[in-house]
Image (cartoon, helix red, strand yellow):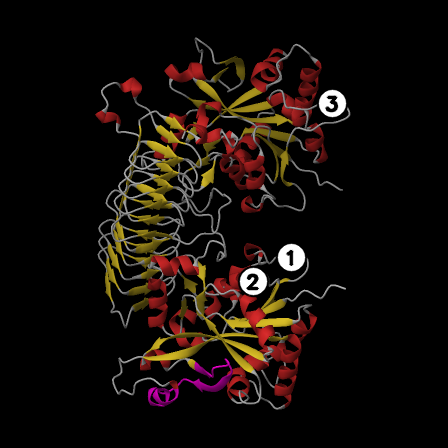
């Protein structure tokens, strides 16, 4: 008899990290934050799952999810509109959490999973891949699942290894792994001094100095059986935070294996890192890695005509989406679909989301403009690299 | 299967070979020829149908249908994947009667009478699959109903000197057609048929069957159906259309039609959110403009990487223009690459072709004394133009002659 095919279901947390980029999540989930000229952050985990052969994906959401539902629709743009499996949208359905797992607004991943336990029970896959929407990367979960099975792990936690400063590390979770790949220590929002000791980096009081660290990418693999037990057990103990109550507190008791993701990734946990992650796409090699043509990142189609450049357009080092009409200067920018840049306007180092209209002779530097922003003529907006100016959705300047 | 009645079914004639587009139609029918940075010609009639509320469309294919079949698929990009109706590709078929290839436009519809009858429509729109225009067929249908016509033919005023290239309609003061001449030497009118017809289906069906049974008759609309209906006194009404319309029969007209998109004086707006032109496109990231690029008066699609100089050109998805390369007054189709030092001007470069380092393609008409030897240069699909070679103006290079 042939052995059963190994397969995994996917679970995506759309609202995790909402509080880290509050400007962008005032009116939407982290998953529906626009990114890279035509995408929403959820496109990355969702496409990665689809490209890894995952055919049932549940998207857990909590609040502000209208734009998310609008974006995902039936899931057919990700090829997830299927007869069996496909896309499952899992918004809260109960009253506000008056008791654990009442189907209301969850407090953490474990409680959220308890709310959707029927979805997990019903999928026919033996494994579950779980991730958030804060990482922009092209990840092959098939490889990670294979490693998970090979190592006989209870949980496989994906991390990226990189060089971090005090500032960039203080929002992250660090996974310290031993030579067998076993996670033996977990630091949530670590302090710099502590890290020097544990991570073996050079001790220094300088805030610009860097240390090498394994940073959790909030992607986890486990068997469905393990997940169900973990969720039920946690419910009976009223534990709701997966990171603290499972990964951190039980790392000595469980076999949690760290999996190092070697590709290009950007983790978004502040408006600065959001800006930086967008700008990282200007690099050819990084762009080619994230937008691997064998493993495309899918998104909602908008049927825009190609971008049009006027006679006096001048555009360098920028990403320009379809439907833009550019008559001014654009430098180091990401322009989303349908952005209009007027004559003699100068836009630099900025991220302009869809359908913005920038009037003639405007000057913009380090601006993040949300959707549908209108700038009259002769307006000047000037931010800095560390503090980009943010313009709300629909604002008229 | 149960079929829900439709008021109007559209039939798009998409079997055309487009022989005068040579290298560009060696692997695909003319309606599948790429246009405007992300479209294929058939996107225009398909999008017009959807935007006009016609949700049941038959696409009649014959010549090299692979690209077109794959492109149309289930019709999803145009919103034509419907429970009732939707888009259907209708290739010629064999039956116990031994019928096979479509022997003309009328014969193509005749062979698909059963398809149309399933929806029991009052009206049928017959459309060409290879014209570029935005038209609301619903308004034309209203006109057809208001005038109680048997057939309504969309017409366009053309310059008198060009009238003999078209099917010309002469009308009375009420717009009723009283004379029709296919490519007349001495035209009596400058109202040219656009190849857009709305017929009352029962009347058309009668004529299609009669035409088929007449062994001597030509099996197309211009040749017999329209003259026969006129002779019999059917009510034939002209419907005036005065917006942009283009039939791209030749390389030069295909090139011109693309250049029209860059001309602000030409009223073909592809950016109107209320009348989108839909197409099936690969999902690609926004295009990237590098530090060394200069782009002027051009249209550029997603997935391109541009680090060279681009002027008055149209680049399709996934095109690469390397640093030091120049592309002027040209159309570069999906996935093509122009390498460093290469110069492409007044040219059409086909899908996935490569112009190697320092090669030159095409030339500026201003630099050529003998105007007759000038023309748009064409590099067909999947051709590799070797480094340091020259493709002169008007030349046509395809895979066989690379």
Q: Chain of mark 1?
A: A
Whether discs 3 and 1 lie on one chain: the answer is no
Q: Earlier in the sequence, mark 1 or mark 2?
A: 2
Image quadrant where residue A237 sits: bottom right
Task: Tell me the element at label 2.
Answer: loop
A186 over A295 or under it: above or below: below
- In this figure, which residue is indicated by the disc labeled 1? A82
Task: From the viewer's perspective, tell me whether residue A207 is left or right of residue B244.
Answer: left
Q: Chain of mark 2?
A: A
- Which of pointers 2 and 3 indicates the residue nearer the eye? 2
- In this figure, which residue is indicated by the disc labeled 2? A52
Q: Residue at x 71, y 15 (%)?
A: B213
Q: Residue at x 39, y 46 (%)?
A: B301
Measured as percent of width and height from the top left, residue A288 is found at 40, 57
Measured as percent of width and height from the top left, residue B5 is found at 70, 38
- Which of pointers 1 and 2 indicates the residue nearer the eye? 2
Q: CA distance from mark 2 to mark 3?
A: 48 Å
Q: CA distance from mark 3 to mark 1?
A: 40 Å
- The local crowd at label 3, few if under 14, some if 14 to 19, many if 20 or more residues have their Cα within 10 Å, is few
Of B200 and B10, nearer the camera is B10
Task: Tell me the element at label 3.
Answer: loop
Please tell me the numbered disc located at residue B98: 3
A193 over B128 or under it: above or below: below
Whether discs 1 and 2 lie on one chain: the answer is yes
Q: Which residues are magenta?
A: A174-198
């Amino acid at each position: 008899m042939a052995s059963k095919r190994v397969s995994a279901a996917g679970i995506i947390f759309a609202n995790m990290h909402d509080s880290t980029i509050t400007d962008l999540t005032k009116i939407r989930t982290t998953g529906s934050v626009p990114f890279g000229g035509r995408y929403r952050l959820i496109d990355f985990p969702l496409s990665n799952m689809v490209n890894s052969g995952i055919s049932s994906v549940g998207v857990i959401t909590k609040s502000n999810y209208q734009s998310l539902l609008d974006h995902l629709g039936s899931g057919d743009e990700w090829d997830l509109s299927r007869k069996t499996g496909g896309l499952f949208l899992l918004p809260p359905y109960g009253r506000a959490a008056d008791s654990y797992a009442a189907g209301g607004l969850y407090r953490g991943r474990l409680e959220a999973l308890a709310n959707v336990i029927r979805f997990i029970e019903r999928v026919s896959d033996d494994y579950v891949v779980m991730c958030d929407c804060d990482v922009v990367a092209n990840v092959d979960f098939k490889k990670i699942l294979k490693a998970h099975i090979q190592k006989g792990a209870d949980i496989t936690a994906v991390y990226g290894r990189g060089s971090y400063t005090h500032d960039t590390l203080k929002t992250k979770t660090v996974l310290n792994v031993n030579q067998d790949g076993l996670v033996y220590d977990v630091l949530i929002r670590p302090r710099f001094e502590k890290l020097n000791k544990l991570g073996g980096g050079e001790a220094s009081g300088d805030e610009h100095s860097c240390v090498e660290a394994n940073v959790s990418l909030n992607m986890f693999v486990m068997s469905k059986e393990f997940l169900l037990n973990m969720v039920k057990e946690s419910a009976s103990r009223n534990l709701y935070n997966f990171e603290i109550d499972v990964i951190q507190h039980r790392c000595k008791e469980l076999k949690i294996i760290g999996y190092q993701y070697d590709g290009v990734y950007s983790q978004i946990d502040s408006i600065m890192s959001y800006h930086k992650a967008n700008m990282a796409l200007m690099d050819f090699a990084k762009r080619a890695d994230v937008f691997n043509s064998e493993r495309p990142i899918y998104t909602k189609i908008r049927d825009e005509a190609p971008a049009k450049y006027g006679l006096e357009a001048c555009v360098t080092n920028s990403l320009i989406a379809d439907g833009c009409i550019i008559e001014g200067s654009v430098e180091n920018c990401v322009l989303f679909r349908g952005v209009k840049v007027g004559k003699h306007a100068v836009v630099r180092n900025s991220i302009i989301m869809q359908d913005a209209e920038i009037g003639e002779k405007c000057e913009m530097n380090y601006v993040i403009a949300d959707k549908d922003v209108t700038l009259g003529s002769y307006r000047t907006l000037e931010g800095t690299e560390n503090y980009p100016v943010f313009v709300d959705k629909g604002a008229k300047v | 299967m149960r079929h829900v009645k439709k008021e109007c079914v559209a039939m798009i004639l998409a079997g055309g070979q487009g022989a005068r587009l040579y290298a560009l139609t060696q692997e695909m029918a003319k309606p599948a020829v790429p246009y405007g940075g992300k479209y294929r010609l058939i996107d225009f009639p398909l999008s017009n149908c959807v935007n006009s509320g016609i949700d049941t469309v038959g696409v009649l294919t014959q010549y090299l249908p692979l690209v077109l079949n794959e492109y149309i698929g289930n019709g999803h990009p145009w919103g034509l994947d419907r429970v009732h109706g939707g888009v259907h590709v209708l290739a010629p078929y064999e039956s116990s009667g031994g019928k096979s290839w479509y022997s003309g436009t009328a014969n193509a519809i005749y062979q698909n009478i059963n398809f149309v009858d399933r929806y029991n429509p009052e009206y049928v729109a017959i459309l060409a699959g290879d014209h570029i225009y935005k038209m609301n067929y619903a308004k034309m249908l209203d006109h057809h109903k208001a005038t109680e016509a048997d057939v309504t033919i969309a017409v366009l005023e053309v310059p008198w000197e060009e009238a003999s290239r078209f099917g010309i309609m002469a009308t009375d003061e009420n717009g009723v057609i009283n004379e029709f001449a296919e490519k007349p030497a001495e035209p009596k009118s400058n109202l040219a048929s656009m190849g857009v017809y709305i017929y009352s289906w029962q009347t058309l069906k009668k004529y299609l069957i009669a035409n088929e049974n007449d062994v001597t008759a030509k099996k197309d609309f211009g040749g017999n159906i329209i003259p026969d209906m006129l002779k019999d006194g059917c009510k034939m009404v002209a419907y005036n259309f005065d917006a942009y319309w283009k039939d791209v029969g030749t390389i030069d007209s295909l090139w011109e039609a693309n250049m029209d998109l860059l001309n602000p004086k030409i009223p073909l707006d592809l950016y109107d959110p209320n009348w989108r032109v839909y197409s099936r496109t690969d999902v690609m990231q926004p295009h990237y403009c590098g530090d060394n690029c200069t782009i002027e008066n051009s249209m550029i699609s997603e997935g391109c990487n541009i680090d060279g100089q681009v002027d008055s050109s149209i680049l399709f998805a996934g095109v690469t223009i390397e640093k030091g390369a120049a592309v002027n007054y040209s159309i570069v189709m999906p996935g093509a690459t122009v390498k460093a030092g290469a110069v492409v001007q007044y040219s059409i470069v086909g899908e996935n072709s490569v112009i190697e380092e320092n090669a030159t393609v095409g030339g500026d008409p201003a630099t050529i004394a003998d105007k007759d030897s000038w023309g748009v240069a064409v590099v067909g699909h999947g051709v590799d133009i070797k480094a340091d070679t020259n493709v002169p103006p008007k030349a046509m290079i395809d895979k066989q002659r690379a």
